[in-house]
Amino acid sequence: MSSLDKLAVDLSKSRASRRRFLGTAAAAGLAVPMMGGLGRLSAVAQDEARNSVVWVSPRGTLEVLDDYPYWVAKQFGYFGDIETEILPAILESTSSAKNVVDGDADMSYVSPGVFADAVSQGLDLVSVFQMGAYDVFDIALPKGNPDGITTPADLEGKTVVLGDIGWAAIVDPMIVQAGGDPSQVNYVAAGSGWAQTLEAGQADAALSWEGLRAQWLATGLDFDYILGYEWSVFPANSFQIRRGDFEDASLTELYTNYLKGWAMGLEFGYQNPVAATQITMEEPSISAALTDTFQDLNVAVESLWQLANVYRGDWDSREGWGWASIEGWQSFFDASAQAMGADPIDASTVVFNDYVAGANEFDQEQVIADASGFELSEAFAAVAAPEGAGLAAS
């Protein structure tokens, strides 16, 4: 969901015996495009009034559809008077988590694997809002799947290409969950061109995720996939904040209302994903890039709907937007610990649902009215709503 961050995942300590290509793209004979740093980290994160939240992406870019709930919430004023800002982190595994710990941002959005790495390294963060209720992560395979790979366990003895080597913390537990041994997998880091590395035949598989696979297809990258949401019991990316902020009662209202904005944006996207796609693609700061990527608006809506499906998850078993299954998280931490040869993290000490009830206390009928009343452009009006969308089903 996520393209995630790097505080310096110390693979040398925990995986010294493993055969893996820790090389950069240079070691693989490839170029490594640099995504750049955060640029500036807003001073509002240090504002003593604390009516602001700075959220940092793990992807190295905001030019994606993944953050549609935020852009919808901004357009409709769902954040109220809270000052909000979202920023891109560098394309390394725990960098956005470190930004939060260092006070440069207030909220990160890393994957469970990167979160586990961050916690294991002593970053005192807690997860407070579960964005990905289903496992968002997929394994991309060459078209036709010439090696007959059907589960992550089949990656033993194969080369898996990643954007950053820290993403091994995402794939390893997937392999464990499928009954495989991640120590038998070779990883190569190829920067932002990791999909092209797979396409060029320089790897056997690649990490991908929902939304991204539609985006890849839109740019001509056509792969077969093992889809995480079809078999995995793991959660996906969540929002994390400093434990100190979580334990500060004076900040409870701020974070609850901020997450309420995201919840309303999520509800809007579920009800009318076509409108949510248009809103996101018309956001001035990212519009040009998204328009260039998604020249077929049907593919754009499909990409957003892939994400919306993961964000909503098994709705009947959840307690609203952002609710996390502690059991699902513990299953992930157990598999991650097995892969790392470490003691598992106790999910109940780092994953919390305290803000969820308040974040879901919004006027659903108003959000539905906003979604149904949104005036689509002529181009988007020609795109059919995905099967299962709220308004389409009503």
Image (cartoon, helix red, strand yellow):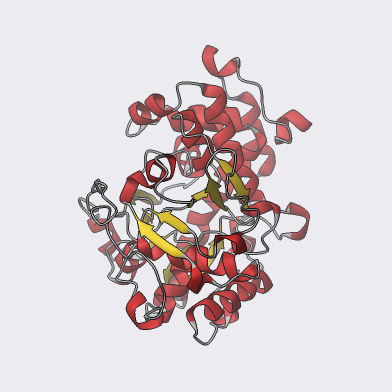
Q: Residue at x 60, y 41 (%)?
A: 306
Q: Quadrant of residue 174?
A: bottom right
Q: Position of residue 138 (x, y in %)?
A: 56, 51
The residue furthest bottom is 343
Vertical position of residue 283 compared to residue 242: above or below: above
Vertical position of residue 368 compared to residue 17: above or below: above
Question: Would residue 89 be visible to someone looking at this image?
Answer: yes
Relative depth, front residue between 330 and 183: 183
Relative depth, front residue between 335 and 225: 225
Q: Position of residue 166 (x, y in %)?
A: 38, 65
Relative depth, front residue between 295 and 278: 295
The residue furthest top is 378
Relative depth, front residue between 353 and 13: 13
Q: Residue at x 29, y 53 (%)?
A: 28
Vertical position of residue 87 compared to residue 14: above or below: above
Q: Residue at x 37, y 50 (%)?
A: 84
What is the total number of numbered labels drawn onto the structure image? Answer: 0
Q: Quadrant of residue 144?
A: top right
Q: Position of residue 76 (x, y in %)?
A: 50, 36
Decide if residue 29 is on the left or right side of residue 160. Answer: left
Decide if residue 281 is on the left or right side of residue 371. Answer: left
